[in-house]
């Protein structure tokens, strides 16, 4: 599926949008104004690319999203190596507050779904303090277990009754992407965005890596030091696999050009 106006490039089978932060904000802002169906946005990083590399089902799921923003400098570097222009890192924790500020004049209604107990509420409160007139349609943090069909239907009813324009989804990868795919046709919102760690960062629960580390693609190391037990596999194993597969693909393409 190719969304009009959103160019893409391929990273190990995963389509990533050729956008920078202003372009991503402008694209989603435009979706709020049109009469199309519910749009879906992810902030794709190395972890997600490797989940797609391992699983054809997840790769197809990501490909069905309307825009996969390049959240991770390795993806940006891959694009630059392939000659892709006009692309820069677009991370969920940065996009969330910047988009809310950029659309304050539109009176957008925001719903915050996910996060640990109390974190979504604190995120909404921080944004209300920061942005005059910021509208919170609702907040809901589901339990960390599989929901029954009845519970799921009740949550959908609660969200739709709040009449949100935008739903920010913070359930972690790949759960949040799976949730968006299975619920987008049952929700009345304009846009669903899977933002991962963004609630924690905006709420001040999780400290962001220094800007220099983010710019040189080393934020993963900062996060690994914060949560080594939970993140060691994601970063040490997946990052190594990504580098190996990327070099292998680049070498294959170079060999084909020389033939």
Image (cartoon, rainbow, N blue to C red):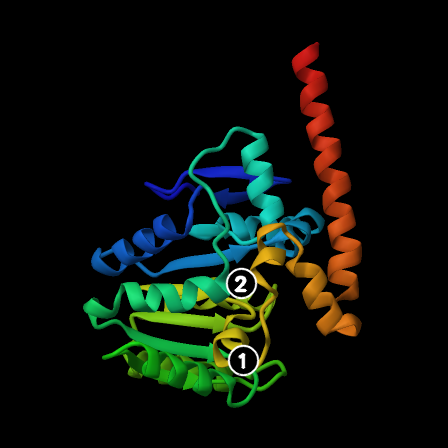
Q: Which mark is residue 115?
A: 1
Q: Are there few (<14), some (14-19), or many (20+) residues within 10 Å of tag 1?
A: many
Quarter occupied by residue 212: bottom right
Q: Quadrant of the N terminus?
A: top left
In the image: residue 215, left or right of residue 28: right
Residue 68 in the image: state x and y as whole percent. Answer: 48, 51
Quarter occupied by residue 226: bottom right
Q: Quadrant of the C terminus?
A: top right
SS class of the residue under badge 1?
A: loop
In the image: residue 8, left or right of residue 251: left
Residue 204 in view, yes or no:
yes
Residue shown at 77%/40% (left/top)?
Answer: 244
Residue 191 in the image: state x and y as whole percent. Answer: 35, 63
Residue 256 in the image: state x and y as whole percent. Answer: 68, 17
Tell me if label 2 and label 1 are in contact, CB under 8 Å: no
Q: In front: mark 2 or mark 1?
A: 1
Residue shown at 34%/56% (left/top)?
Answer: 25
Residue shown at 25%/71% (left/top)?
Answer: 108
Identify which residue, 153 or 114, lies in the foreground.
Answer: 114
In the image: residue 90, left or right of residue 60: left
* In this view, 66 is above or below 157: above
Q: Which mark is residue 177?
A: 2
Identify which residue, 206 or 171, lies in the foreground.
Answer: 206
Q: CA distance from mark 2 to mark 1?
A: 14 Å
Farthest residue in the bottom direction?
118
Residue 157 in view, yes or no:
no
* In this view, 135 is above or below 256: below
Residue 97 in the image: state x and y as whole percent. Answer: 39, 69
SS class of the residue under badge 2?
A: helix
Count of numbered labels shown in the rendering: 2
Q: Are there few (<14), some (14-19), or many (20+) residues within 10 Å of tag 2?
A: many
In terms of sequence position, does the residue under pointer 2 or pointer 1 come before the other? Answer: 1
């Amino acid at each position: 599926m190719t969304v009009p106006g959103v160019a893409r490039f391929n990273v190990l089978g995963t389509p990533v949008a050729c956008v920078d932060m202003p372009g991503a904000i402008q694209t989603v802002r435009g979706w709020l104004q049109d009469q199309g169906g519910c749009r879906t946005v992810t902030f794709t990083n190395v972890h997600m690319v490797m989940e797609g590399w391992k699983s054809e089902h997840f790769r197809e799921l990501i490909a069905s999203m309307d825009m996969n923003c390049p959240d991770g400098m390795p993806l940006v570097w891959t694009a630059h190596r392939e000659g892709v222009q006009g692309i820069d890192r677009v991370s969920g924790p940065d996009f969330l507050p910047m988009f809310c500020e950029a659309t304050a004049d539109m009176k957008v209604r925001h719903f915050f779904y996910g996060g640990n107990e109390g974190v979504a509420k604190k995120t909404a409160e921080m944004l209300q303090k920061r942005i005059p007139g910021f509208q919170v349609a609702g907040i809901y943090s589901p339990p960390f277990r599989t929901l029954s069909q009845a519970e799921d239907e009740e949550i959908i009813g609660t969200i739709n009754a709040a009449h949100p324009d935008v739903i920010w989804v913070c359930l972690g990868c790949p759960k949040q992407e799976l949730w968006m795919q299975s619920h987008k046709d049952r929700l009345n919102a304009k846009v669903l965005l899977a933002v991962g760690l963004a609630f924690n960062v905006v709420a001040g629960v999780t400290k962001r890596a220094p800007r220099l580390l983010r710019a040189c693609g080393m934020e993963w190391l900062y996060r690994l030091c914060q949560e080594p037990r939970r993140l060691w596999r994601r970063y040490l194993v997946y990052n190594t696999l990504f580098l190996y597969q990327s070099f292998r693909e680049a070498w294959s393409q170079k060999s084909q050009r020389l033939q």
